[in-house]
Amino acid sequence: MAQMLSRTSVLFLLFFTGSIEIGSAQGRTERPKVDLSGFWMLRFDPAHDVIMASGNSLTGYIPPASLRPEAARAVKAAEERAESVRNTIPTGVVGEGSRWCRPGAYPFFMRSPEAIDIIQGDREVMVTGDRPMAMRHIYLDQKSHPAGWEPTIMGHAIGRWDGDTLVADSIGFVGGAIPGALATTPQTHLIERYRLLPDGRLSIVFTWDDPTIFTKPHTYELFYYRQPRGTFALENFCDPSDPRQYTEPAVPTSTRPFQ
């Protein structure tokens, strides 16, 4: 697979050199002392992740959520359906979005084995992944979510700097599952805190809240490692014309805590 400059890297150069502007000048937040820009990769962290009984490492461990009784029953039923469908696929290949260009709803690509690319600007921070339509915008020049927002797979995110921590507030999700829980609903609300640690890692703390799913907010932390200079994005190949996507059973999204 040939290496190439990512489309997001090109955008980065354009809006930082003034060739294009993203958002309005009004409401621009003060530039922090840290720069989150670059490629970051989720890796096994022995201090926070776990080794399963099989001996395999579990990267990006998600602790169990505190679910409402009806949500817990729905999670169990979804796990049973997913297991029954998996048993019908002899090859063990999951017929899902990465093969057929079906986009994965946020935060799917934040736990993918590929690196994420963060592009930090004065008015906006973009977070992208090497997956179809895996591009997220965190607007720093907006103080509130727009009225009448039509839900999307990435939701609508507004950001602010709390010292050197980027705080992103998101609503308006459609489709996709909250790790360790159920699919998002119109009441789903996500707060993320992006922070550089003294050892150079990037900590992102995710806090999900939804009164129809949780008895208390569902929080977990993931750790990413900055990739060396010269890291490039690779094109993610998918085939939307593959007729098997209409006949091969798709595995329902697993909702178990360590999916």
Image (cartoon, grey):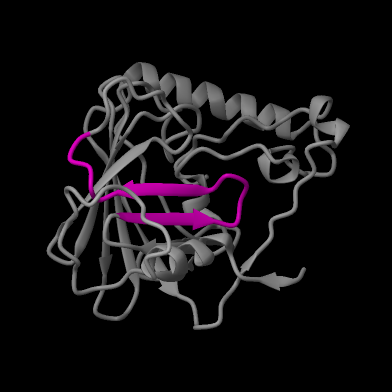
Q: Which residues are magenta?
A: 124-144
Position of 207 relative to 214 (above/below) = below
- Residue 245: x, y in percent? 80, 31
Q: Give the residue at x 72% y 30%.
A: 250
- Residue 17: x, y in percent? 39, 70
Q: Give the residue at x 56% y 77%.
A: 231
Q: Is residue 134 magenta?
A: yes
- Residue lying at the far top of the rendered structure: 70
Q: Quadrant of residue 171?
A: top left
Q: Is residue 167 left or right of residue 67?
A: left
- Residue lying at the far front of the rendered structure: 19
- Residue lying at the far left of the rendered structure: 163
Q: Is residue 81 left or right of residue 246?
A: left
Pick the quarter of the image with the N terminus. bottom right
Front-most of 28 and 64? 28
Position of 175 relative to 238 (above/below) = above
